[in-house]
Image (cartoon, rainbow, N blue to C red):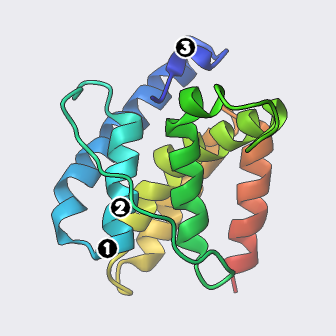
Amino acid sequence: MFDKDLCTCDAGTLSLLTHWQERTVAVAEATVQHQREDYKEFTELCLLYLDDNDKSRSFNFRRPGAVHKARWMAKILYSVKMVLLQNQISLLPRGTITTATQQQKLRSFVDFVCLIYSRWWMTSTSAVDEPWHNLCLYQDLLKYAQVNPVVFASALQALNRQLW
């Protein structure tokens, strides 16, 4: 579902997107069996979204649960599902679930989450390793400015709120 063709980027940025995609798929495949329910679902959705080489990948969509501030993972899960089901949603009457501008923003968010954030989330399992993973996230985030400056600015602002 991830479509690098939608990116109006130069060859270097396209190469960077491909590199991130391959790294994230490798990390997700290595960690998916060792995660609890919602993290496992997140990893499986990322694989489904990013791995265009494996057409045989199956996934059962789970019923939505509670969505509130304490369940931030739910917002990510439902965003990825909405992008994956974009073709079916487009068959509904206009404005039923999302508008055209919301759908584009949702896709940009899901691209960032699956390419950058998910890899950081899947590898951040130890407090000892956390400074290294945060630095790697920050470096990838700075490179992401080439791909989508708006998402980069928003993500950088959120990451800076976590620094103390």
Tell me: residue 53, above or below residue 135: above
Tag 1 residue: 37
What amino acid does circle 3 point to?
Asp
| Residue closest to the far front | 93
SS assignment at label 3: helix
Q: Position of residue 149 (x, y in %)?
A: 77, 38
What amino acid does circle 2 point to?
Glu
Tell me: residue 15, above or below residue 104: above
Tag 2 residue: 41
The residue that appears at 73% across and 59% down in the rendered structure is 156
The residue that appears at 61% across and 50% down in the rendered structure is 141
Q: How many other residues sit within 10 Å of disc 2, few (<14), some (14-19) or many (≥20)? A: some
Look at discs 1 and 3 and give the one toward the viewer: 1
| Left or right relative to 43: residue 8 | right
Image quarter where the C terminus lies is bottom right
Residue 154: image quadrant is bottom right
The mark nearer the N terminus, 1 or 3, is 3
Q: How many other residues sit within 10 Å of disc 1, few (<14), some (14-19) or many (≥20)? A: few
What amino acid does circle 1 point to?
Glu
Could you give the CA–CA distance between mark 3 and mark 2, rounded to whole angstroms?
26 Å
The answer to whether residue 140 of the structure is visible from this angle is no
Q: How many other residues sit within 10 Å of disc 3, few (<14), some (14-19) or many (≥20)? A: few
The answer to whether residue 80 of the structure is visible from this angle is yes
SS assignment at label 2: helix
Could you give the CA–CA distance between mark 1 and mark 3, rounded to whole angstroms?
32 Å
Q: Which mark is residue 5?
A: 3
Q: Position of residue 78 (x, y in %)?
A: 56, 56
Q: Position of residue 21 (x, y in %)?
A: 39, 36
Labelled pair 1, 2 in contact (Cβ < 8 Å):
yes
